[in-house]
Image (cartoon, coloured by chain):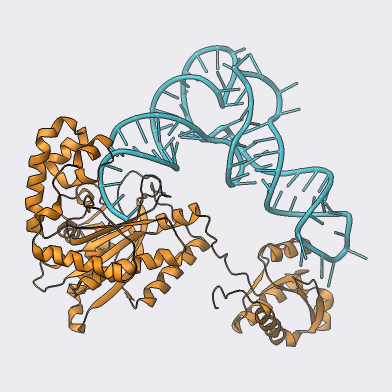
RNA sequence: GUGACCGUAGCUCAGUCGGUUAGAGCGCCAGGUUGUGGCCCUGGAGGUCGUGGGUUCAAUUCCCAUCGGUCACCCCA
């Protein structure tokens, strides 16, 4: 197995996907699936030639003269799909979401894996500030649905490319005299990408930055008004946020609104999710179709870490409705036959495949939390009957073999009817 | 890519200052109950002590390499 590629395949995973999909549906976002394999050019143009992802974190697949990459993120692929399939022709605004694997060739650590899983949404075709606020609200709604608390929403505006460019120069000019205070990587960033210094973890650099110029002061009236509207929408919806003028994003396509959701439970990789507006992505991809967009991306593994840290209860896998216990060779054939009969009628059935003792089969039924067991041996087969045992009460009744499905159905209905706990999931 | 730490049973971990058959708890299997789960009791299976090499009379233990893992830097979900 390649480094950093463990894929959790547990009931927790099922549960997480289920809650995400339901939340997305509540906001009426529609799922879009894009290929895991993408043309290298799309990703390079989309997230920027100089970005860390493109320069050192991509898994490249070559075939003949074609170069593909395993997608490192999903926004650019979604935009490609939107352009390629002319989704703008569907009229209105597209509200889309995705969930699936992404790949980045970084050194694995807590909350960071080479194959990881993202979910996120993209609203394409609207530059209304409410779209930004809606995306943020959706992002928070997901974590809310999981009961995750203590995370912080930070927002900022990255302005327009022109404004940012002026700011970068001003920041560089301001920092250059303080070169000696910067760390080694800080000095490298000063050359390559001064914006990245803003989210430094170095305390001396953080102290220095307190007096540095701010991007917001280099933005024009339009940018500022837009930013104010987004904040106002968030306020109207009662969403708490922290304004952080030092917040930047690592992908080049972002502009205007940028945001990040941080959790104290994650270790060094503290971002649960992040996103922003990317009105110029479509043109970076070579389209002249205007496609203003805004979205967020979130890591499922980090969500699982947060759930774990908060000792959240994750619903267990559903038990079978009935476990069939067989004694002897003839009964083993009966167990398979009977399981199939029940399954065809929508009753979930399970049975032993190792020819184990009755005691072991009963234990297995108990372990699987089956509410009922159906027991048969030579005696029952010859008499055309089976034993139905209620595992909860221990009560056992003998049934005529042909009445089994309807009887079990009835018992299940009775058992479910008497439960006042919330239904976990319908079958 | 850089650095630090860690690899003993399915899992969580003891242990050996180098020395007869490497342990515990949980889990698993079986018996106690000629065909009945949970609790309890008894027994059992399961380990090339990550791998390769070196030092030594002797290595799971020391050394080197390698592979795997973890965390941090960096980066970001």
Instruction: Locate residue A195, reporting x and y percent.
Output: 17, 47
Q: How far across and how far down the image is residue A95, in percent? A: 28, 75
What residue is drawn where x is 45% and y is 53%?
Answer: A305
Q: Quadrant of residue A242?
A: bottom left
Query: In x, y percent, where is residue A54?
Result: 20, 51
State which quadrant residue B30 falls in: bottom right
Does A421 appear above or below A61?
below
User: Considering only vertical position in the picture, is A74 above or below A182?
Assistant: below
Residue lying at 12% horizontally and 63% vertically, measured from the top left: A223
Side (left or right) of B39 relative to B18: right
- Total marks shown come to 0
Closer-to-camera residue (A144/A37) = A144
Left or right: A405 in relation to A231 = right
Residue A350 figure quarter: bottom right
Quarter of the figure with the C terminus of chain A = bottom right
| Residue closer to the observer: A16 or A187 | A187
The colour applied to the residues of chain B in this rendering is: cyan
Chain the render paints orange? A
Find residue A423 and report its horizontal and vertical position in percent.
57, 76
């Amino acid at each position: 197995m390649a480094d950093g590629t463990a894929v959790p395949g547990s009931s927790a995973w099922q549960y997480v996907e289920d809650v995400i999909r339901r939340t997305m549906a509540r906001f009426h976002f529609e799922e879009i699936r894009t290929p895991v394999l993408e043309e290298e050019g799309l990703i390079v143009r989309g997230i920027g030639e100089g970005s860390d992802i493109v320069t050192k974190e991509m898994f490249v697949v070559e075939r003949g003269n074609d170069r593909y990459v395993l997608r490192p993120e999903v926004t650019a692929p979604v935009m490609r799909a939107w352009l390629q399939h002319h989704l703008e022709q569907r009229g209105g605004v597209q509200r889309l979401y995705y969930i699936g694997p992404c790949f980045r060739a970084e050194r694995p650590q807590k909350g960071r894996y080479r194959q990881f899983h993202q979910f996120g949404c993209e609203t394409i075709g609207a530059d209304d500030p409410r779209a930004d606020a809606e995306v943020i609200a959706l992002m928070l709604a997901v974590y809310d649905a999981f009961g995750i608390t203590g995370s912080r929403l930070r927002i900022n505006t990255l302005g327009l490319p022109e404004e940012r460019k002026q700011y970068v120069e001003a920041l560089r000019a301001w920092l250059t005299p303080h070169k000696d205070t910067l760390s080694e990587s800080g000095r490298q960033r000063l050359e390559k990408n001064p914006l990245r210094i803003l989210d430094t973890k170095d305390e001396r650099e953080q102290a220095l930055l307190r007096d540095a110029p701010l991007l917001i002061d280099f933005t024009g009236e339009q940018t500022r008004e837009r930013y104010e509207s987004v904040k106002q929408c968030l306020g109207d919806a009662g969403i708490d946020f922290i304004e952080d003028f030092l917040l930047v994003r690592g992908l080049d396509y972002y502009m205007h609104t940028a945001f990040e959701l941080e959790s104290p439970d994650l270790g060094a990789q503290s971002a649960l999710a992040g996103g922003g507006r990317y009105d110029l992505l479509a043109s970076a991809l070579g389209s002249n179709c205007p496609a203003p967009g805004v979205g967020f991306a979130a890591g499922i593994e980090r969500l699982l870490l947060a759930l774990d840290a908060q000792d959240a209860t994750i619903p267990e896998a559903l038990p079978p409705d009935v476990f069939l216990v067989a004694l002897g060779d003839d009964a083993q054939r009966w167990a398979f036959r009977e399981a199939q009969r029940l399954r065809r009628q929508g009753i979930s059935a399970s049975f032993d495949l190792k020819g184990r003792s009755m005691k072991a089969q009963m234990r297995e039924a108990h372990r699987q939390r089956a509410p009922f067991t159906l027991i048969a041996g030579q005696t029952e087969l010859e008499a055309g009957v089976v034993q139905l045992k209620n595992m909860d009460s221990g009560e056992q009744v003998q049934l005529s073999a042909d009445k089994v499905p309807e009887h079990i159905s009835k018992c299940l209905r009775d058992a479910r009817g008497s439960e006042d706990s919330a239904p976990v999931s319908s079958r």
